[in-house]
Image (spheres, rainbow, N blue to C red):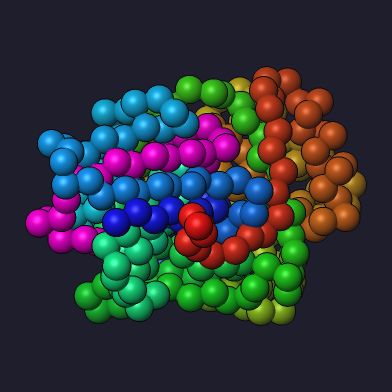
Amino acid sequence: MRAAAIAQPNIALIKYWGKRDVDRNLPAVGSISITLRELFTEMHVQLDAGLPHDVLAVNGTPDTALLPRLSACLDRVMGSERSRARIDSRCNFPIAAGLASSASAFAALTVAAAAAANKSPEPAALASLAGRASGSAARSLYSGFVELENTADDIAVRTLRDPGEWPLAVVVAITASGPKSVGSTRAMELSRQTSPFYSSWIEQQPHDLGVARDAIMRRDFEKLAAVSEHNCLKMHSIMWASRPPVVYWNSATMGCLQTIRDLQAQGVGVFFTMDAGPQVKAVCLPEYAQQVRGALAATDGVIELMESGLGDAARLVDLT
Ligand code: PMV
C-alpha cells in the first residue's frame, strides 16, 4: 500500500529524438545514455481508498500540473481499478529545465508504484512501463552506460558498462532557471512533421549507436566524444530547421560550448552534450573535472554548476 523509490536522471550521449508511436510513446530511434549519481528524484506512493482523486506534492508543494501524467503512469503500472494515491516527489535539481527530471521522476514512480501494488514485474516490463510515461525514463532503470534498443513492438534496455568500469564525470552548467520553452513531445512532433533533416537523422542513428557502443566497450574517450557531440548537434539542427523553429540555446549555452572547445584545444578530455533545454553537460575524464568546473564557472551567464559521477539503477527505498 505504501512504497518509495529513488532514481537518478540520465543524460543521452546518442539521443532519442522522435516517436514512432505517439500513443504508446515508442521512440523512433535507439539511444545510449549515462545514468548520473548525485542528482535524484525520490517518489513516495501511498494508496488510500478514502481519497477522491490522486494528490501530488513536489518538494512539499501541492502540484496539479504534473499530476495527470503521473496518474496515467500509476494506472498503467497498477491497473485503472487501483485506489487513489498520495504521491510525494522530492527532487534535488531543477524540474522540466532540460535536466532529465522526467526520466528520474517516472523511473522512480514506476518502481515505487509496482511495489505499492505488491507487484514485482520483470526488469523488461518495468522499463517498458517507464518508457510509456517518458522515453528517457526507461534508461534510468539501469546503471552506468545504458543502451535502449527498439524491438519490433517495444523497447529493450540494458547496461553496457557499470559505472565503476569507466568512471567518467559530468559537470552540468545551468544557464537558465525556468522551465523549458517547448515540451519535448511537442518539439519532437514538430521535428518529425516539418524538419527537412528528420529522415536523415533516423537513417544515421544506427551508425552513431554502433560507434558509441564500440567506444564505450573499448573505453575510447576521443571516439565517444566525437560521436556524442556530432549526434547532439544533429539533434539540435533538426529542431532549428523545423517550422516553427525550436531553439533551446541561449548565449550562455554558446559561451559554454566555446569554453569546452578551448579546453579541448589544451588537451583536456572533455566533450559537451545538450538536451531539450539550454543547459550544457560537460562529460569528462575524472582527472579533469576540477579544471572543467573552473572554466565553466568563469563563463558568462552560467548561473550554477552541478557535478556528478555515474550512478546506479532506480531502486526501492527502505521505509522501515
Ligand atoms: O523522455 P523525454 O520525452 O523527456 O525526451 C527526452 C529527449 C532528450 O532528452 C532530448 C534526448 C534523450 O535521449 O534523452
Which of these two is toward me, 64 or 260?
A: 64
Q: Residue at x 54, y 65 (%)?
A: 313
Is residue 148 rendered to the left or right of residue 301?
Answer: left
Q: Mark yes or no: residue 195 visible.
A: no
Give coordinates of residue 167: x percent, y percent.
Answer: 75, 64
Identify whether 221 is placed above or below 264: below
Magenta residues, start to end? 77-99
Magenta stretch contains residue 80:
yes
Magenta stretch contains residue 252:
no
Give coordinates of residue 232: x percent, y percent.
Answer: 53, 50
Give coordinates of residue 94: x percent, y percent.
Answer: 52, 32
Is residue 86 rendered to the left or right of residue 207?
Answer: left
Is residue 165 rendered to the left or right of residue 264?
Answer: left
Main secondary-structure element of the magenta-colored stretch: loop
Identify whether 4 is placed above or below 158: above
The N terminus: image quadrant: bottom left
Q: Quadrant of residue 261?
A: top right
Residue projecting furthest to the left? 81
Identify whether 250 is placed above or below 133: above
Q: In which quarter of the image is residue 291?
A: top right
Q: Residue at x 86, y 50 (%)?
A: 288
Which of these two is toward me, 93 or 46?
A: 46
Q: Mark yes or no: residue 269 visible.
A: yes
Q: Residue at x 70, y 33 (%)?
A: 305
Q: Which residue is drawn at 81% across and 26% down?
A: 298
- What count of labels does the image hold? 0
Give coordinates of residue 71: x percent, y percent.
Answer: 22, 45
Which of these two is toward me, 141 or 134?
A: 141
Which of these two is toward me, 156 or 126?
A: 126
